[in-house]
Image: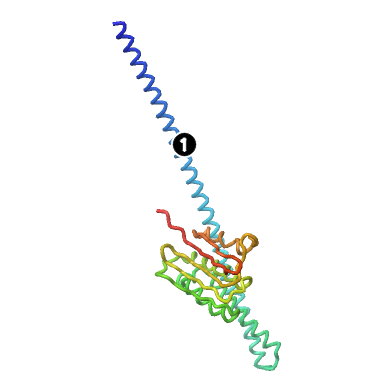
Amino acid sequence: MEGNDLFLTIVVSCLTIFLVLSLVVALLVKSSIRQHEHRMALAQAELLKDQEILHAEQQATQDTLQEVGRELHDNVAQLLSLACLGLGSEMDRAPQNKMISVAYEGAVRALAEVRRLSHTLNVDLWDDLSINEAIVKEAERVRVSTGLALKVHVEGELPALDARLKMGLYRVFQEVLNNTMKHSGASQLIVTLSAAPVFTMRMADDGKGFDRRTARSAGGLANIPVRCERMGFDAYCETAPGAGCTWRLVQRAVQS
């Protein structure tokens, strides 16, 4: 009997120890899971906060740009229109005066540029304007003023883009175009808009290219990836000396 009692005591003690250890392990696992969930919740809250701040910054920037666009259209353009009328009248009175003629032509070009800029800054006007239509409109102006051949290709049925997104992409296009005209020595810039597998905007020139390792990171070149990041795009630059420069803007897949 005493041997049986001792054996039973040992079994009960072992079971008790096992249960206690199991309970401790379970509590530790549960605590670890809770800590992980807490960290995940904090990370998610921080991400949402960052997104809200970024959205607020973007909204403030877009509102400012739109206000600038309205001011250009309502004030500066009107002043230039009056200047054009006045210079036009003077030209009629003194058609041989070259100084008046040059001033008139400059005022007309300035008025056209201000109107173009005010339209691209006004987000409301992008509701009915596609990104490819905006680039096509720019192509003729660029060809006449610089001689650069700007071509636009569309592959597939492009998705409907938000007006602010279209305006943002157009800003990036303008930055690439500006760099192409100033530094590349290119004769053409080909813009390709692709619908699949995700919306992609590709801008390739036939210029002299550059070495990214030694190129200055300041200015427009550095701004392009930053702008794209804020719009939910990844920006890739492919270039080498003598090989032209190609920018690819790839829209990130929307997380479900």
Asked whether residue 255 appears in the rendered view, the answer is yes
Front-most of residues 157 and 86: 157
Is 144 on the left or on the right of 12, as rendered?
A: right
Q: Residue furthest front?
A: 242
Say which quarter of the image contains residue 116. Answer: bottom right
Q: Position of residue 200 (x, y in %)?
A: 47, 65
Q: Position of residue 11 (x, y in %)?
A: 33, 16
Asked whether residue 66 appears in the rendered view, the answer is no
Is 89 on the left or on the right of 129, as rendered?
A: right
Residue bearing the label numbered 1: 35
Front-most of residues 150 and 125: 150
Q: Dot 1 surroundings within 10 Å: few (below 14), some, or many (20 or more)?
A: few
Mark 1: which secondary structure? Answer: helix
The mark tally for this picture is 1
Say which quarter of the image contains residue 161. Answer: bottom left
Front-most of residues 145 and 246: 246
The kind of residue tagged 1 is Gln
Q: Residue, x 40% and y 69% (percent of image)?
A: 156
In this picture the colour scheme is rainbow
Q: Position of residue 202 (x, y in %)?
A: 50, 67
Q: Residue, x 54% and y 65% (percent of image)?
A: 247
Q: Position of residue 73 (x, y in %)?
A: 57, 74
Q: Residue furthest left?
A: 1
Q: Is residue 69 above or below residue 228?
A: below
Q: Residue, x 31% and y 13% (percent of image)?
A: 8
Q: Is residue 25 above or below residue 95?
A: above
Say which quarter of the image contains residue 213. Answer: bottom right
Is 53 on the left or on the right of 198, as rendered?
A: right
